[in-house]
């Protein structure tokens, strides 16, 4: 089995997780995304200019921190710096992984442009809208931090072989052990590999259908 046939396997109807174990990721940040969004919520309660500006800043920090958390969770922090040079570049990586609807990222980006303009007095409604969309983003992606697959097995009734998935976040690779007929072959992809995102996205699609 090569990369092409691995992708075919992952994308076939009937491919599913047969067993899985999860763990919670220890993020390498002193202040976590949920803390920043909590600060922003308290800032909004002030309902004045100082509170709105603080809420805007803390909401942006929550967003940036969650983006970096996802980058770390999927082992993408080892990519060349040019691919991680700014939030739009990181947005593209997350969009390619398929872990969040593109329209949500589009909304976040449009609101984020407001944040980039300094010396602007934002309205309460603008800040609340930005807070709401970022809060939604945090809630919809926290499962990848709290319940990241530590190990899982993938199978398809139409095939004789099955796959064991494993990874090393620090080294930045994912690995599929192909098993069947007493044979074993391992396909390992590092985050620098051009197929890394494509294979990971196909794996995530199978993961999201797991019951």
Image (cartoon, helix red, strand yellow):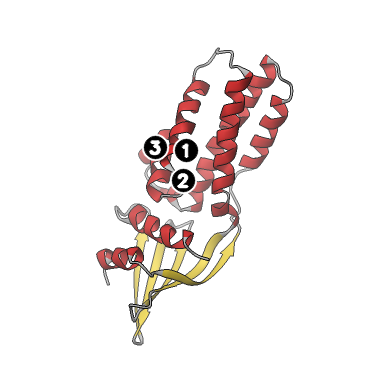
> Would residue 86 be visible to someone looking at this image?
no
Q: Which residue is mark 3?
A: 89
Q: Secondary structure at mark 2?
A: loop
Task: Answer few, some or many: residues within 10 Å of disc 1's Cα (few below 14, many 20 plus, some between 14 and 19).
Answer: some
Mark 3 or mark 2: name the one nearer the start of the chain: 3
Front position in the image: 56 or 167: 56
Q: Is residue 131 above or below residue 206?
A: above
Q: Which residue is mark 2?
A: 100
Q: Secondary structure at mark 1?
A: helix
Instruction: Kindly indicate whether the residue at mark 1 contacts the one at mark 2 (C-beta within 8 angstroms).
Output: yes
Front position in the image: 71 or 51: 51
Q: Which residue is mark 1?
A: 104
Q: Position of residue 41 (x, y in %)?
A: 69, 31
Q: Report the side of 175 relative to 127 (left or right).
A: left
Q: Report the side of 52 relative to 190 (left or right).
A: right
Q: Residue furthest bottom?
A: 182
Q: Is residue 123 above or below residue 153?
A: above
Q: How many numbered callouts?
A: 3
Task: Residue at 58%, 58% (x, y): give it.
Answer: 147
Q: Position of residue 66 (x, y in %)?
A: 55, 42
Q: Position of residue 13 (x, y in %)?
A: 35, 67
Q: Is residue 136 above or below residue 40?
A: below
Q: CA distance from mark 2 to mark 1?
A: 7 Å
Q: CA distance from mark 3 to mark 2?
A: 15 Å
Mark 1 or mark 3: name the one nearer the start of the chain: 3
Task: Residue at 51%, 52% (x, y): give it.
Answer: 73
Q: Position of residue 178 (x, y in %)?
A: 36, 75
Q: CA distance from mark 1 to mark 3?
A: 16 Å
């Amino acid at each position: 089995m090569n990369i092409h046939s691995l992708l075919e396997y992952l994308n076939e109807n009937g491919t599913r997780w047969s067993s899985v174990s999860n763990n919670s990721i220890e993020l390498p940040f002193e202040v976590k995304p949920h803390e920043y969004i909590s600060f922003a919520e308290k800032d909004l309660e002030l309902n004045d200019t100082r509170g709105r500006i603080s809420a805007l800043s803390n909401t942006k920090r929550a967003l940036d921190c969650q983006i970096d958390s996802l980058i770390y969770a999927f082992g993408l922090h080892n990519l060349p710096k040019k691919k991680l040079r700014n939030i739009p570049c990181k947005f593209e990586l997350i969009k390619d992984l398929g872990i969040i609807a593109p329209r949500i990222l589009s909304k976040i980006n449009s609101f984020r442009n407001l944040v980039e303009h300094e010396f602007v007095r934002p309205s309460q409604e603008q800040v609340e809208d930005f807070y709401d969309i970022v809060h939604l983003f945090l809630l919809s992606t926290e499962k990848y931090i709290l319940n990241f697959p530590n190990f899982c097995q993938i199978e398809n009734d139409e095939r004789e072989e099955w796959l064991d998935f494993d990874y090393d976040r620090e080294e930045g690779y994912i690995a599929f052990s192909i098993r069947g007929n007493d044979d074993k072959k391992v396909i390992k992809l590092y985050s620098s590999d051009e197929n890394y995102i494509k294979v990971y996205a196909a794996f995530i699609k199978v993961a999201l259908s797991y019951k």
